[in-house]
Image (tube, helix red, strand yellow):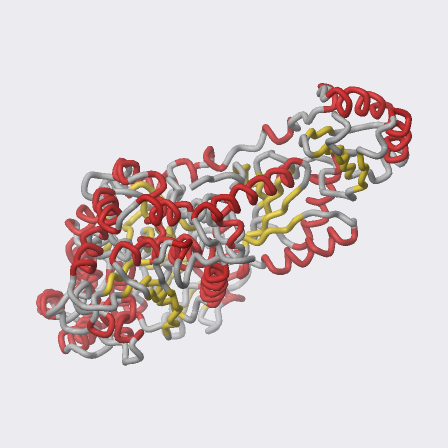
Amino acid sequence: MAKFKSVEELNQWREHLQKAAQSRSESSTTITIGMGTCGISAGARAVRDALVNELDARHMDVEIVEVGCIGLCAQEPLLDIQQGAEPRVTYANVTPKMVPRIIEDHLMKGRIVDKWVFGRVQSGGQHDN
Amino acid sequence: MTTNSPATVLVSCLHDHEPGLLSAFKRQLDTQGLSSQVEVIDAGCRGMCSLGPIVLIQPEQIFYTNVHTEDVADLVGKTLVNQEIIERLTYKRPESHEAVCFYEETPFYHRQARTVMRKCGMIDPQSIDSYIANGGYRALGDVLTFMSPEEVIDAVKKSGLRGRGGAGFSTGRKWEHTRHAPGSPKYVIANGDEGDPGAFMNRSLMEGDPHSIIEGMIIGAYAIGANQGYIYVRDEYPLAVHNLNLAINQALDYGLLGSNILGSGFDVKIDIVRGAGAFVCGESSALMQSVEGKVGEPRPKHFHATERGLWDLPTALNNVETWADIPLIINRGADWFASIGTAGSTGTKTFCLAGAVQNSGLIEVPLGITLREIIFDIGGGVPGNHEFKAVQTGGPSGGCIPASLLDLSVDYDSLAEVGSMMGSGGMIVMDDHTCMVDLARYFLDFLREESCGKCTPCREGIRCMLGILTRITDGQADMDDLEKLETLAVTVQTASLCGLGKSAPNPVLSTLRYFRDEYIAHIRDHKCPAGVCKALITYTIDADACTGCDVCRKRCPQNAISGERKEPHTIDPELCVKCGICYDVCKFDAVIVT
C-alpha cells in the first residue's frame, strides 16, 4: 500500500473499503470474538482455537475477527455471529465445548441457541464517524 | 443484462441439499446462449447453511436464499436476462432472531451513551482498514483541508471538553496556552499510565481502538504546532502496547503519520514510551520526567507544562480518552459534544464499574447522570441480600460517597464538592459488609507504597495516617488519634507537591465526613459494625439455628469448631483465627459475627 498523497486518496480508499465490506457482508458470515485483555483472561484464546478447528472440519469459509472490549467484561468470552446484513447475535460466557453446538445450530440449522445468547447488536458496519 | 456486461453467479452453502444446482445453472445458461457472459462459481460454504443454497449475483448484488434446481430457469430467464427480482427467493429475516433483544434494550446498555468507545468491540483494532472503513481519519482529512490550527482550538474550546484523566482542565485552553507559549519544538503526550486498582478504561480504549487516540493526537499536534508526540503506556498492558505499535506503523505506511501528511506539508511523529508501572508516573510532571529518562518524580509547579513541559518545552499532555474525543468533536461538531452532559461538564465519560454490583464492566455515560442511575440501572444494584453502603469514585485517592448522596450528578464539580473526584474513572461499589475504616486503611497502604517520597508531607504524612488507621482497626486508638488523623490529612492535602499527594487523604477525609460513627465505634466501643476488622470481632454459633450439619467443623482450618453431628457446634475463641470460612459455608445463618 502506497502512502496517501492527498485527502482525496484517503477518501477514495475509504469508499472502496466500505463497498468491499458491504458486498462481502451481504452473503457471508462473520464471527467476532472479544479478545481484549478481559476476553483473553476469561479464555477467549481457547474459544478461538476451538472455532478455527470446527470451521476447518466443516470446510466453512467464515471470517473470524478479533475485537477489543465492548464493556461486558463479566460476560466474556463473547462470541458474535453476523450473517448477512442481520444484527450481530452475541453469545456470552462461551467455552470451547459450546462452539460445535453454536456452529451446528446457528449456522447450519438457522436456530439461535437461546440459552446462551446475551443479545443482538447493530453491526459496526458503517459507522461513518 | 446486456451482452457487454459480464455477470458472476456465486453459489454457496450447497452441501448436500442440491448437488445438481451448479450443472443445472450451466445447462440453462447454455440453452440461453449466455455461457460466455456469465460465470458460475462454487463459493463453498460461507456459514449461512440454514439459508442455503445461496446465490449471489454480481455486480448487481442480488441475493437469493434457498435456491433449488427448479428455480434455475426463472433465475436465469428473469433475473439475469431481465433484471427482474424473484420475490419468493429473496432473503426473509428469520423469526427466531426477532425474539432476541438488542443491546440497547438491556438494562446494562440502555442508559449508556457509547461514543468514544463506540468502535471498541466492533472493529478489528489491529487493522487500520477496519478503522478507516468505519469513518476513521475522516476528521484528520477535514482538519487538514478545511481548518486552521486556531479553528481547531476554537472547536475544542467550544465543545467544553475537559481532561479525562481526572483533573478536568479545559482541553481547548490547554492547547491554546501550548500553542502560544514561546519555545520550540513543542510536544503532545497521551497519558495511558492507568494505575488505579480496578480501573481499565484506558487499557480497553488503547487495545480496542488505538487509531482513535492517534488520530486525536495528530489533530492536536497540528493545532498546537507540534511535530512529535509520545504515548506513555504502562508495560503491564502488553496488548495495548502491541496494538498501539501496530497502529502507529500502519499509519506511517499510509502516510497518515510522518512527513507531509496527506500532502498537507504537516509532519508529525508519534513514539511509544513504556512506563514501568509506578503510580506516580500518571502525574503529568512525573510522567514527563520519566519520558526524559529520569526518575519519575513530580516537579515543583512554578511553571505549567504548557509552557515548560517535556525537556522544558511547551507540551500538551492529555489522557488517552481526551485524545480519542477529538475526532468525534471534529466529525460531529462542537455543539453536538456540548449538548451532551451538563453546562460545566460536557460529553461522555467512561467508568469501570466494579465491586459489589450485579453488572460489573466498562461503561460510558453522559456526564450529569446520577450515581443512582449508574449503580442501580446500569449496574443492576448490589447482589445478594446486601445493602448499598458507599461508592468510591476517582481511584485510590478518590472519596467515598454515601447512600444519601446517590442522586448526585456525576460531573467534575459535583464530585469535588462532596469530597471525591472524577479521577480517571474508577467506580467501586461497596455493600454493608465493607468497613469504611478498613477501606481507608487499605487505600492508604496502597498510596504509601506508591508515594515517590520526594516531598515530606506525602511521604511521612501518609505513613503516619496509615499508622493511626491501623491502630483504629486494631482497637488500640483513642479519640485523640482521630483529631491527629484529621490534622494530618489536611496538612498532606495542603502541603504536598503534586496532585497525587494532595488527593491522597481523600479516602480518610471522605470516610470521616460520612462515616464518622464507624470510626467512633472502633475506638470507643471496640466494635467493627461491618464485621471486618479481625481484632474487634468474634465468631460464635447460634445454638438454636445450628443443625449440626458438621460442614463448618470439617472446613475449619484451625480445628477450632467442635460438636457432635446433629448437635449444635461451638467455636473455641482461643483457636479461632477469624478467617470467616465457617460464616461463608453455613447454609443456616447460624454463624454470627459480633
Q: Residue at x 63, y 39 (%)?
A: A25
Residue A27 visible in the displayed image: yes
| Tag count | 0
Could you tell whether A72 is left or right of B472 in the image? right
Could you tell whether B138 is left or right of B497 in the image? right
- B215 and A39: which is toward the camera: B215
**Quadrant in the rendering for residue B437:** bottom left
**Quadrant in the rendering for residue B573:** bottom left
Q: Residue at x 70, y 24 (%)?
A: B90
Question: Where is B537 relative to B75, above or below?
Answer: below
* Rendering coords of residue B138 (x, y %): 42, 45
**Quadrant in the rendering for residue B490:** bottom left
Q: Residue at x 26, y 59 (%)?
A: B225
Q: Residue at x 71, y 21 (%)?
A: B85
Looking at the image, the residue that sits furthest to the front is B4
- B111 and B372: which is toward the camera: B111
Question: Where is B196 relative to B48, above or below?
Answer: below
Residue B403 visible in the displayed image: no
Could you tell whether B6 is left or right of B332 in the image? right
* Rendering coords of residue B548 (x, y %): 51, 57
* Rendering coords of residue B216 (x, y %): 35, 53
- A82 and B330: which is toward the camera: B330
In which quadrant is the C terminus of chain B drawn? bottom left
In which quadrant is the N terminus of chain B drawn? top right
Could you tell whether B506 is left or right of B108 in the image? left
* Rendering coords of residue B117 (x, y %): 41, 48
